[in-house]
Amino acid sequence: MKKLTSMIPLTILLGGLVAALVGVLPLDEAGKTSWLLGALVSSLLGVLTLVLKTQLSVPGLTGAAALKALLAAQGLAFMLRLIAVGVGAVAVNQAALSPVAFVIAFFVVSLAQQVLETKSLLTALNPVKSSEVIS
């Protein structure tokens, strides 16, 4: 699962790209600040998630045991993201900023991270080729 930690720079780059969109989006100052905070929080949480998934993955696991460990890590990552977006939206709202911009930026970065994580996890687990399934 070392491949996951090699994706940390890409995760940060994704957050930076989404944050850079603030220049082209028609947002007021409060919306821009919220957008930047959402992208930042999601990027940092993505890095934390990758580190946690790497730490929770046990080398040498295969089959059902590997899938169980992977699903446990995915569940933990999902709960962390859920808590972070909820707390962040409430904090942004209390600061009189735009919670909608925060949530949208958070999930744009998060969705891109999920695609990358899933792809790397599938390649790391060496999935069975379709030609091997059919005997």
Image (cartoon, rainbow, N blue to C red):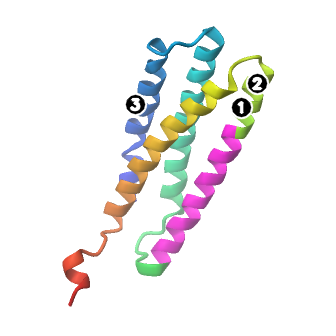
Q: Which mark is residue 60?
A: none
Q: Earlier in the sequence, mark 1 or mark 3?
A: 3
* SS of the residue under disc 3: helix
Residue on which the image places disc 2: 93
* SS of the residue under disc 1: helix
Asked whether 42 or 100 is in front, the reply is 100
28 to the left or right of 109: right
- Kind of residue sitting beneath label 2: Asn
Give the CA separation, mark 2 to mark 1: 6 Å
Residue at 46% from the left image edge and 73% from the top image edge: 66
Residue on which the image places disc 1: 89
Q: Is residue 2 visible?
A: no
Read off the magenta span.
65-85
Residue on which the image places disc 3: 13
- How busy is the neighbourhood of tag 2: few (under 14 within 10 Å), some, or many (20 plus)? some
- Kind of residue sitting beneath label 1: Ala
93 to the left or right of 5: right
**Residue 2 lies in what quarter of the image?**
bottom left
Residue at 71% from the left image edge and 18% from the top image edge: 97
Q: Earlier in the sequence, mark 2 or mark 3?
A: 3
**Residue 39 lies in what quarter of the image?**
top right
Q: Are marks 2 and 1 in contact (CB under 8 Å)?
A: yes
For discs 1 and 3, the disc positioned in front in the rendered view: 1
Give the CA separation, mark 2 to mark 3: 27 Å
Q: Are marks 2 and 3 in contact (CB under 8 Å)?
A: no
95 to the left or right of 127: right
Above-or-below relation of 58 to 3: below
